[in-house]
């Protein structure tokens, strides 16, 4: 299953609402996870199963979608949110695949 | 607190071999689903292999037959034996735990860099 994210990068300002899209090549139900990766660090799981916000992750992060189309939304971008975000399908067990990433940069 | 610490990366010639280690603390690897995932600038994140708590192992097609995942329960360590290495295996290799058993990775190591070059 191929995962395609868009855009590949975006520029935004602190306080902006940001939306990242992830599309699966076929239906993955709601088996979709989102990660944040800061430079030089390992990915960090933000949301699992589309809407399962991980402990300690701010509520400004939310996700939605089902089937093939999914979104990650940051309601009010903070400075610490500038990072790269990846989606990952966990439907095709055990052959998980990731999107290519969306880099969120400061405008 | 869960900690995963990888080691064993380095420079190796094409066709060579390398064994990566992932020492875990705060968890028992034999009770968990442990994977290796790599990252390159070009291909992004790529899931490579998993060893389930029951001992079953699975591999991505790109490494099947060349890489072997294993664990040492006494050392609480997961390994990735990499043989017949190619230039395209150059990447940062992460050890990660599927902490909910559903294919999402809540715990990651810091990564170890493998460079395949002559």
Image: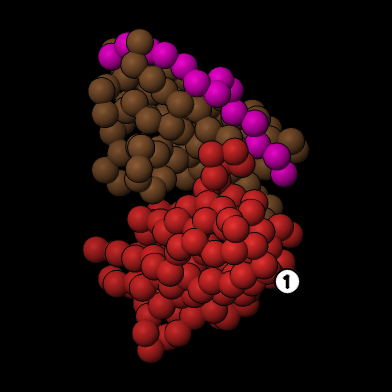
Chain colours: A brown, B red
Chain letter of the residue beneath label 1 in the structure image: B
* The quarter of the displayed image where residue B32 is located: bottom left
The range drawn in magenta is A1-14
The foreground one among B30 and B81 is: B81
The foreground one among B47 and A70 is: B47
What residue is shown at x 68% (from left), y 52% (from top)?
A: A92
Q: Which residue is mark 1?
A: B65
The foreground one among B116 and A72 is: B116
What residue is shown at x 74% (from left), y 36% (from top)?
A: A25
Quadrant (top left/top right/bottom left/bottom right) for the N terminus of chain A: top right
Decide if residue B102 is in sight here: no
Rendered position, A13 above or below B4? above
Taking the image as shown, residue A18 lies to the left or right of residue B90, namely: left
What residue is shown at x 30% (from left), y 64% (from top)?
A: B3
Where's residue B1, x and y in %?
Answer: 24, 63
* The quarter of the displayed image where residue A80 is located: top left
Where's residue B112, x and y in %?
Answer: 42, 59
Taking the image as shown, residue B98 lies to the left or right of residue A6, namely: left
Residue at the bottom extreme, as displayed: B74
Decide if residue B87 is in sight here: yes
Q: Is residue A105 magenta?
A: no
What residue is shown at x 41% (from left), y 45% (from top)?
A: A43
Q: Could you say whether the residue bearing mark 1 is in a helix, strand or loop?
A: loop
Taking the image as shown, residue B45 lies to the left or right of residue B96, namely: right
Q: Is residue A4 magenta?
A: yes
The crowd level at tag 1 (other Cα within 10 Å; few <14, some 14-19, many 20+) is: few
How many numbered discs?
1
Where's residue B82, x and y in %?
Answer: 59, 70
The foreground one among A33 and B47 is: B47
């Amino acid at each position: 299953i191929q995962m395609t994210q868009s855009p590949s990068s975006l520029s935004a300002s602190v306080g902006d609402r940001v939306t990242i899209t992830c599309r699966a090549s076929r239906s993955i139900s709601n088996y979709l996870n989102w990660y944040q990766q800061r430079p030089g660090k390992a990915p960090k799981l933000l949301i699992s199963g589309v809407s399962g916000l991980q402990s300690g992750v701010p509520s400004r992060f939310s996700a939605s979608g089902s089937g093939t189309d999914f979104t990650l939304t940051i309601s009010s971008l903070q400075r610490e949110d500038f990072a790269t975000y990846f989606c990952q399908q966990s439907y095709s067990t055990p052959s998980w695949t990731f999107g290519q990433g969306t880099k969120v940069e400061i405008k | 607190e869960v900690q995963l610490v990888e080691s064993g990366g380095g420079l190796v010639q094409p066709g060579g071999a390398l064994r990566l280690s992932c020492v875990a603390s705060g968890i028992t690897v034999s009770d968990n689903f442990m994977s290796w995932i790599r990252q390159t600038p070009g291909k992004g994140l790529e899931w490579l292999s998993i060893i389930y708590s029951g001992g079953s192992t699975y591999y991505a097609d790109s490494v099947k037959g060349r890489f072997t995942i294993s664990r040492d329960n006494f050392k609480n360590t997961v390994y990735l034996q990499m043989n017949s290495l190619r230039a395209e295996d150059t990447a940062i290799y992460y050890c990660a735990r599927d902490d909910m058993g559903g294919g999402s990775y809540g715990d990651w190591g810091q990564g170890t860099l493998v460079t395949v070059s002559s």
